[in-house]
Image (cartoon, coloured by chain):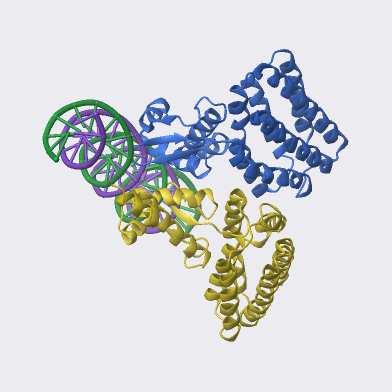
Chain colours: A yellow, B blue, C purple, D green
Amino acid sequence: MNDEPVAATETEERGARHRFDRIYRVLRTRICLLDYRPGQRLREEDLAEEFGVSRTPVRRVLVKLEAEGLLRSVHGVGTIVTDIDVDELAQVYQLRVALAELIGNLAPVEPEADTIAAFRTLLARCEALTHDPDPREFARINMDFFHLLNSLTANEPLREISERLYYQTTRIWLKTASRLSRYEQMLLDEIRIFQREVADIVAAIEIGDLGAVGHIRRSHISMSFIRLRHEAGR
Amino acid sequence: MNDEPVAATETEERGARHRFDRIYRVLRTRICLLDYRPGQRLREEDLAEEFGVSRTPVRRVLVKLEAEGLLRSVHGVGTIVTDIDVDELAQVYQLRVALAELIGNLAPVEPEADTIAAFRTLLARCEALTHDPDPREFARINMDFFHLLNSLTANEPLREISERLYYQTTRIWLKTASRLSRYEQMLLDEIRIFQREVADIVAAIEIGDLGAVGHIRRSHISMSFIRLRHEAGR
DNA sequence: CATCATGATGTTGTACACAACTCAATAACA
DNA sequence: TGTTATTGAGTTGTGTACAACATCATGATG
């Protein structure tokens, strides 16, 4: 009866796969929070040292991040965080808008009690944020909110694709806004708008209208991008 | 004036990136044509030897194919071609159906003369196929047709995602049909239906109605899956 | 006879040394 | 002085040996 290691694998996901996912998530988060700025050069050896492994497993992660468009490895030069600009991302936003509606339509899943609770917790964090605006915390809440929304569809390919597109676009707000003079005011405005979105969606979820969630989300993504483009144009 | 290598890079994409893409495409095609059967175990060393490289660059390719759901590497066991079944792929098909329509709507690109010519050539290949049915050639034409359709949108993220979903699902027909007794007849039927789809779409393209292309494609993907599911159910 | 331990074998994962490559600084030259 | 080689440092890409792991056969043990 040697099932102890199996159980451990089940709960903790030991081994190579786990290390891989861990490093992957850390790097992805750093890129999206602009801890690594667009255009910044990363050194494989530094990353390897930080995570206590050799370059080999690090490179695996970098290959995946490159496939997702967050990095670009150039032989003899370095591994560079991809730069982004509002115009290039317009296409990705178009697609995200279209997909947002699908989450409510394709294989909607009746939210569990704890899922609803998680939404409420998030709403509270959001409210707290309006009293103490912080761009990083804003980005984090945004990320958590996205993952919660994503769990509302049982269509796994849709979840995967939405996630990928989300991580491709989420940096653009921080990057664009941080360079503008109205930064503080913009941040506060955006937080308030976001808070209303969360409130709207939580209301729709509590009623059980997942279709409405999709519509709300769709319009908010669309408007958010238009606002950004407008601010960036000036 | 040492710009010769630069020019070569531009046209032929020498170097690591090129090798990588080459191996990647070859393996992906083999998986989708069932040269590698679902469940089959691949050995990294065999692949390395075949392509004249070491395991290292091969593993890069395998990581990417694993991220796309075509392979699964298990430590100590092997690299296994993912098995697929009709029920699991239902979700992917749902998504493909939804995305098909977007190709005509998001950033439609006016087809060039040579693109239209390519469609006509394909239609001819398709016609020839009805006289000499061959499952592999059918799959190849299907693949080429997909890539042509995909070039009708300038939305690159959409192209990328559509491609990924296509390669996730395209094996299922060959796999399912090849196990059925009515295989020969099914193949011929399916080829004829496909030929009509191609004819319809070529007509829509020549008129310049890309929206119609999306609708035709959408309904054909949907029906194709329903037929498959129906046959598989019995 | 059933069951569990143990070792042999084969595979992917990792570490590390070296090759290929880029770029900038510097020297050579017209 | 301007321009072109060249050298050097620094980085990613590759090859290779070994570690970690899974599986199966074999035999010990109750």
Left or right, A210 with reference to A183? right
Which corner quadrant of the image does residue A224 belong to?
Answer: bottom right
Count of number-bearing discs:
0
Left or right, D18 with reference to A101? left
Residue A187 in view here: yes
Left or right, D7 with reference to B87? left
Q: Residue furthest top?
A: B132
Give the vertical position of B189 relative to B230 (above or below): above
Q: Residue furthest bottom?
A: A131
Q: Give me the residue at 67% from left, 25% from top.
A: B141
Residue A157 image point, x, y percent: 60, 48
User: Quadrant of the image for the C terminus of chain B?
Assistant: top right
Residue A39 image point, x, y percent: 51, 60
Residue A59 image point, x, y percent: 40, 49
Give the vertical position of B172 relative to A61 (above or below): above
Nearest the eye: A8 or A230: A8
Left or right, B7 with reference to A4? right
Q: Give me the residue at 41% from left, 30% from top.
A: B42
Residue B117 in view here: no
Nearest the eye: A3 or C11: A3
Residue B98 image point, x, y percent: 72, 47
Nearest the eye: B169 or B56: B169
Q: Give me the residue at 53% from left, 75% from top.
A: A137
